[in-house]
Image: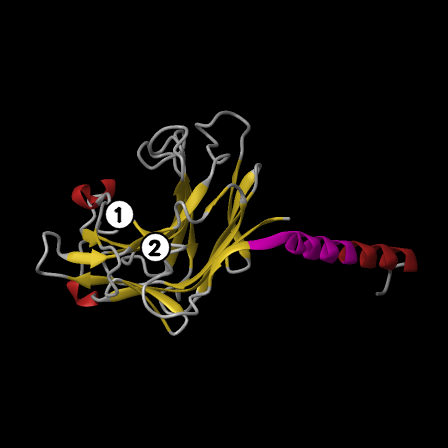
Amino acid sequence: MKGKTIFQISILVLFISSALLHSCSDKDNYQLVWSDEFEYSGLPDSTKWSYDIEGNAWGWGNNELQTYTSSDINNAEVLNGKLFITAVKEDSISKPYTSARLISKGKGDWLYGKIEVKAKLPGGKGIWPAIWMLPTDWEYGGWPESGEIDIMEHVGYEPDSVYFTVHTESYNHGIGTQKSQAVYEPDAEHVFHVYGIEWTPKKIDFYLDDNKVFTFKNEGKTYAEWPYDKRFHLLLNVAVGGGWGGKHGVDDSIFPCQMVVDYVRVYQLK
């Protein structure tokens, strides 16, 4: 402490204490409003999750190669405290793969809050898991006008990276303006990580474990830039192929492959 006065040391201690208190109070201001800890066995809890199968006929707009199933334990099963979403090679159907796309729509819809999903990701060329959010009411119009929040995306041909992205009318991949951040995470396919957001009227902060990796700010313009003042719901899925996931083809030797989810937790301010 050479060269510092007692006054300076006192100010430093007060500053650190204030910062710690602020951090703790921010955490304490949130309350858990919805969760699935997967402490049961069988199909996912039907009071919290539904199955999205409506886009199967047209490849979900991404030329995806899987058929999403409904209430099929081969594609979505809760076992030993974890949710397993499994993509399977299938030769007896019109498309060569099956998988699951779980949604909380109508059972978990939120405006603002903190969302955390602890998951281990599947790997291999052609696989495309995602943890994301879509608007519940589509009040500003279809995609991308009403927005999309990609809490995490991963493509198997880039095993060391995960992506955090938003899509709006002004910022989306269709016109090459999407706001996105790639993060180097070489063990995403081998260990669990917590993928999350903190969403307020002013911004969306994206987190990998406890590290903030990306921020998308409300520019104060129109819904074209910020449609995030309406309700959104969660989606958990494992896609196969598609314009991004299948960019370098699909390696059939990787199947079956699974995204394993330890928990999903949603908090809102008290």
User: Label 2, on which residue?
Assistant: 154
Q: Residue furthest right?
A: 6
Where does the N terminus fall, quadrant-wise?
A: bottom right
Q: How busy is the neighbourhood of tag 1: few (under 14 within 10 Å), some, or many (20 plus)?
A: some
Q: Quadrant of residue 155?
A: bottom left
Is-magenta flag for residue 19? yes
Amino acid type, label 1: Trp
- Numbered range of the magenta stretch: 17-32
On screen, 249 above or below 141? below
Q: Position of 48 compared to 99: left or right?
A: right
Let me know if residue 265 appears in the view: no
SS class, disc 1: loop
SS assignment for the magenta stretch, majority? helix
Q: In front: 119, or 50?
A: 50
**Marks 1 and 2, how far apart at CA:** 10 Å
Find out whether residue 63 is within the magenta segment.
no
- Residue 73 in picture, x, y percent from top left: 26, 65
Q: Does any portion of residue 260 appear in the rendered image? A: yes
Q: Residue beneath label 1, please?
A: 244
First-in-chain label (1 vs 2)? 2
Rendered residue at 35%/62% (across/down): 121
Of residues 40 and 170, the one drawn nearer to the viewer in this rendering: 40
Residue 191: give its label. none
Quick one: label 2, few (<14), some, or many (20+) residues within 10 Å?
A: many
Q: What x and y, as percent, mark residue 95?
A: 13, 52
Q: Where is residue 156? Give x, y as percent.
A: 28, 58
Please report the residue visible at 42 percent of the width from the left and 45 percent of the height from the top.
Answer: 233
Q: In the rendered structure, which amino acid carries the disc numbered 2? A: His
